[in-house]
Amino acid sequence: MQIFHKMITAIDIRKDRIYGMRARKFGGILSKPVHDTVRIEGNVVEHLRKLKEKLNPDVEDIVVTNFPVEDVLFNTLDIPKEIKRSELRNYVTAEMSRILNLSSSEIALDCLRNPIGKVLVVLTKSRRLNEWVSNLTSAGFPLPDVVIPDVFKYLQLIRITTLETCVLILLTPDYSGVVVYISGSPVGMRTFGHSIEETLMIVSEETGLNETEIIEEISSSGSGRVRDVFESIVVDLPYSVEREIIFMLSSALPGSSIRDVANFYVFCDPPDLAQHYSRLFETVETFQGKIKTLQPQISPKGLAIGTLGLLLRGGEEFGKNKLVQV
């Protein structure tokens, strides 16, 4: 018996907490979101069970979840022109198996083709992916319809439409990353260790303020002790990002230079810090005059923006059928 999806459940597992959101999609609009958060202290399955009780998902739900970027390999391959769309996954699987010296059964991957004849590959070990999914089903959630690397939940919320070579600088609570775009499509990607959450924790220890208060102080105009402490921690970040971009370009677009990049887009979680980080990057010659700030296309309205991105990704599955045994 086939039953149409009516609700979307998003499960966003981060380093120290799990965010959950459930909403209905009707007429292209996500409505009446129910959301909750649980902290992770010990067994992740136990905390997933608590979230499951709060969200109360149905077996008919579209279920979408993230996958940790530290378990994902990003790679860029050149694709022969004669490779058809229907043959792409098999070709990429064979190439990555050869490069990594692993059998195709040991890896799970997806890929995104770019108009310039390249493909961005995201890959993990099948065993690790199965363990991740098993945690969800052991907690009582339906089998996920979609599992995406964590970074892609943010890409759901932004659009870069320029045809020129551009770089997205992504700064999140758990990690940061750089993504090179050509013709509005990702071509290469790298992640690295800068964490907004850890940075705010250090500022909190120095000032005694909580995260919300810190963000308000940093976002306000003028200078102050909070901003001074924050800037003393992140002052070298632009140089670290510059190095990451150079490494990424050398592998994804050999022969290209960071000087060839038309614009650098800064996107933050939380979004309120984007303007401040943008001003920080403007102090470095490489980025001067090329920095632009990106905000989510949909207003979070107090919702966790990464989890909202997962919910939107689940919405793309709307209208497809899910086979349910009854």
Image (cartoon, helix red, strand yellow):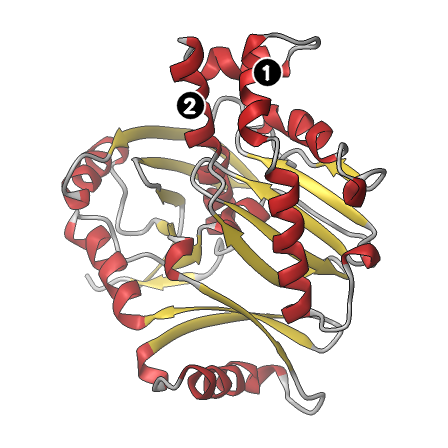
Q: Is residue 207 above or below residue 238?
A: above
Q: Is residue 308 above or below residue 77?
A: above
Foreground pick, 192 / 112 = 192
What residue did someone put label 2 on?
Answer: 202
Q: Residue at x 67, y 75 (%)?
A: 118
Q: Residue at x 58, y 59 (%)?
A: 189
User: Residue 158: which quarter of the image?
Assistant: top right
The quadrant of the image that shows the C terminus is bottom left
Foreground pick, 150 / 54 = 150
The type of residue carrying mark 1 is Asp
Across and down, in percent, residue 115 comes to 74, 72
What residue did someone put label 1 on?
Answer: 228
The type of residue carrying mark 2 is Ile
What number of labels is visible? 2
Q: Is residue 32 visible?
A: no
Q: Is residue 242 visible?
A: yes
Q: CA distance from mark 2 to mark 1?
A: 12 Å
Across and down, in percent, residue 10 comes to 38, 43
Secondary structure of the residue carrying numbered label 1: helix
Secondary structure of the residue carrying numbered label 2: helix
Q: Is residue 134 left or right of residue 243?
A: left
